[in-house]
Amino acid sequence: MAKKKKEVEVVEEPLVVEEVVVAEAPAPKPQPKATPVVKEKPKDTWEFKDRIYYLKGRKKPLSYSIRSSNLYWFDEEKGYEREVKYCQNQNTSFVDEMQGDQRLEHIIFRSGSLFVPKEKTVLQKFLSLYHPHNGQLFYEHKPAEIAANQIDILEMEVEALVAAKNIDIEMAEAIMRVEVGSEVSNMSSKELKRDLLLYAKRNPALFLELLNDDNVVLRNFGIKATELGIIKLSSDQRYFMWGSNDRKIMTVPFDEHPYSALAHWFKTDEGMEIYSNIEKRLN
């Protein structure tokens, strides 16, 4: 009897398919558009006010006319010269901006001055900003600037007077010798002080310059030594010599003032020794 085959049950497992998830790249964010840089025009700082212009120099003619056309002004922003002129029917001084007819206007100074009211802005700008003869042939009267300059001068005068009041007699003599020469040797201390104060008031800038100049004292030292016969200057002003034996001390460089050269020489090693020797004799 044939054997019955044993049936083997085959169980099929379900096929598992792994789902691959592909990550999508993030969409690029939209970049903000660059904001164009807009250069702001410089603000017009022109001050609306009446202005007065004066001719330079002492002459004040009854009437004097200046050029109002065929003039050029260099425009730094545009990089070239622009023709300017003053026309009574235009609201600009630049020829390339004018429109229509151009009625040229004369600019006349009366008795050396010209008054321009604030309503005539074009004429004021033409004279103050664009006219090439501004500062040469005429100028604008500016009270604020004049006051500032006067304050500077007055402050310098005060500084010079205070310095002159507190200065020692030796320095006073050195400074006044520059002004009056050898006459300072015959002046009393009161005369010297008075003249020094007057000099400081009259020439404050020069006085302060001399006060801070080391060579002024050394020049005075050399002149005093010469006046007392300790040293002497040759007749051709080329040599300084000892007054006692005519032995040469130094040679004056060509084209230099003898005592200025002596003052510089006193600062050298050799000159300092001679300076000390002279100083002992003066004392």
Image (cartoon, rainbow, N blue to C red):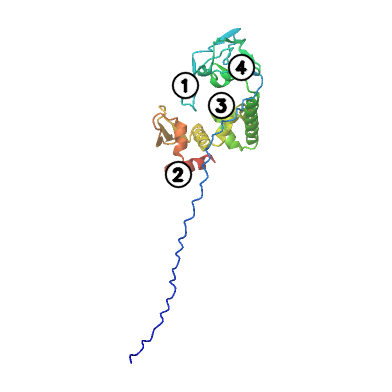
Could you tell me how many numbered marks the image carries? 4
Q: Amino acid at mark 1?
A: Glu
Q: Amino acid at mark 3?
A: Val
**What secondary structure is marked by label 2?**
helix
Q: Which residue is mark 2?
A: 273
Q: Residue at x 62, y 25 (%)?
A: 46
Q: Which residue is mark 1?
A: 81
Q: Is residue 71 visible?
A: yes
In the rendered image, the residue lying farthest to the bottom is 1
Gap between marks 4 and 3 measured at Cα: 41 Å
Mark 1 neighbour class, 10 Å CA radius: few under 14, some 14 to 19, many 20 or more: few
Q: In the image, 160: left or right of 23?
A: right
Gap between marks 4 and 1 measured at Cα: 25 Å
Vertical relation: 117 (above or below) 221: above
Q: Which residue is mark 4?
A: 53
Q: Which residue is mark 3?
A: 180
Res. 61 image quadrant: top right
Mark 2 neighbour class, 10 Å CA radius: few under 14, some 14 to 19, many 20 or more: few
Quadrant containing the N terminus is bottom left
